[in-house]
């Protein structure tokens, strides 16, 4: 995906009725799964640029969706739930067959909202992060969790973990390593711990720290107003994504900030700002992804545009316009030179 040679154009638009909350390509690149605030799950045919009739998931609700290694089955969770259900049911993860619209299995164990799902690219295990401050490891073939990780009280060098902070976890592209992030107390920063997926019981093999002071300095260098920069630097991390080699980690936050962190030593590599309609830093959760070749970073803006950044230099390569509302989801096709982005509608971009 060389954005220096040309700008991709929108090849298809799939209309929606509510803002998208999550999207995931299947591993063949043929289908895109999109969850939206109206409890609908849409299936977009990426080769034809059309969508199939949406699944309406009113009973369970949907906020997050993740593809699996079976292109007719997905994992989903979240959304508005029936408050009469018990806690385990309300915060269950569902394994849905798209072939016959049946729940194949429910994964129960979390006592708080599931905030992130990460599928292992090598097998049927996956990780969930939750507002109950735990990380759980599961396997699609069995209902109970394989392992549960509670956040420790102490981080690197004896630093205190925020007792109210929510963790996030993700597998790297090999499935042999997974990372866990958690906020430090008193807005000091965040920790990033790396684990061997085959021997996670032995603890983290690498413990890194990203200080908010370092983030603030990087933002200030972008000529952001001091008060805005200070607020952005304290943003809560919401997800992490490894690049193919595992040497860089892309972090999204609950405000208009995206970070690139070195996957080996935890040093801050770059900061990227998602902007609002008036050009100031955005206040909504950021949306970002790696391009399929890892050479660029794509970030969604509140004015409906997308910024394209060079992953090495951090320079802005392009600003692509195509949406009428905030770009809340963005993803890169794993097999084809295609990008998907969503506000209420979902756009497929091609060169």
Image: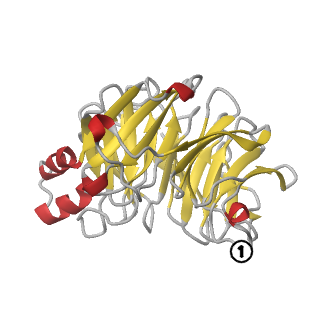
The one nearer the camera, 174 or 272, is 174
The one nearer the camera, 88 or 153, is 153
Asked if 59 appears above or below 144 in the picture, the reply is below
Crowding at mark 1 (Cα within 10 Å: few <14, some 14-19, many 20+): few
Asked if 303 appears above or below 156 in the picture, the reply is below
Asked if 240 appears above or below 14 in the picture, the reply is above
The one nearer the camera, 42 or 166, is 166
Could you tell me which residue is drawn at 46 percent across and 39 percent down? 180
Q: Is residue 6 visible?
A: no
Residue 163 in which image quadrant = bottom left
Residue 71 in percent (x, y) is at: 74, 40
Asked if 259 appears above or below 52 in the picture, the reply is above
Residue 164 in percent (x, y) is at: 41, 59
Could you tell me which residue is drawn at 35 percent across and 40 percent down? 155
* Quadrant that contains the N terminus: top left
Could you tell me which residue is drawn at 18 percent across and 60 percent down? 230
Is 200 left, or right, of 273 in this rendering?
A: right
Residue 346 in percent (x, y) is at: 56, 58
Could you tell me which residue is drawn at 15 percent across and 50 percent down? 222
- Colouring scheme applied when the structure was drawn: secondary structure
Q: Which residue is mark 1?
A: 82
Residue 347 in which image quadrant = bottom right
Is 34 left, or right, of 280 in this rendering?
A: right
Q: Is residue 145 visible?
A: yes
Residue 46 in percent (x, y) is at: 64, 45
Is 328 left, or right, of 208 in this rendering?
A: right
Circle 1: element type:
loop
């Amino acid at each position: 995906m060389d954005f220096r040679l040309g700008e991709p154009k929108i090849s298809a638009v799939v209309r929606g009725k509510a803002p998208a909350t999550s999207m995931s390509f299947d591993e063949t690149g043929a289908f895109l799964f999109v969850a939206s605030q109206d409890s609908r799950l849409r299936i977009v045919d990426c080769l034809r640029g059309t969508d199939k009739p949406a699944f309406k998931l009113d009973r369970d609700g949907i906020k997050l969706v993740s593809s699996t290694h079976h292109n007719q089955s997905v994992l989903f969770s979240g959304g508005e739930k029936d408050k009469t259900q018990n806690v385990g049911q309300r915060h269950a993860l569902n394994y849905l067959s798209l072939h016959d619209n049946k729940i194949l299995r429910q994964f129960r164990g979390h006592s708080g909202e599931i905030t992130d799902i990460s599928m292992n690219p090598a097998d049927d295990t996956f990780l969930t992060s939750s507002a109950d401050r735990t990380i759980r490891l599961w396997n699609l073939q069995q209902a109970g969790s394989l392992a549960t990780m509670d956040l420790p009280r102490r981080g690197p060098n004896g630093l205190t973990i925020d007792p109210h902070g929510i963790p996030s976890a993700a597998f790297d592209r090999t499935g042999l390593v997974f990372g866990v992030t958690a906020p430090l107390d008193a807005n000091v920063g965040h920790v990033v711990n790396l684990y061997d997926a085959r021997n996670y019981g032995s603890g983290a093999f690498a413990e890194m720290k990203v200080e908010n002071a370092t983030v603030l300095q990087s933002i200030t260098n972008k000529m952001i107003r001091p008060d805005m920069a200070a607020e952005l630097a304290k943003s809560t991390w919401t997800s992490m994504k490894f690049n193919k080699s595992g040497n860089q980690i892309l972090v999204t936050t609950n405000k208009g900030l995206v970070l690139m962190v070195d996957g080996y030593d935890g040093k801050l590599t770059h900061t990227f700002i998602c902007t609002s309609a008036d050009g100031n830093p955005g206040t909504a959760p950021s949306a970002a992804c790696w391009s399929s070749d890892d050479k660029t970073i794509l970030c969604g803006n509140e004015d409906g545009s997308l910024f394209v950044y060079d992953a090495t230099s951090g320079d802005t390569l392009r600003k692509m316009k195509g949406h009428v509302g905030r770009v809340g989801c963005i993803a890169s096709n794993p097999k084809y030179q295609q990008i998907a982005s969503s506000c209420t509608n979902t756009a497929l971009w091609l060169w």
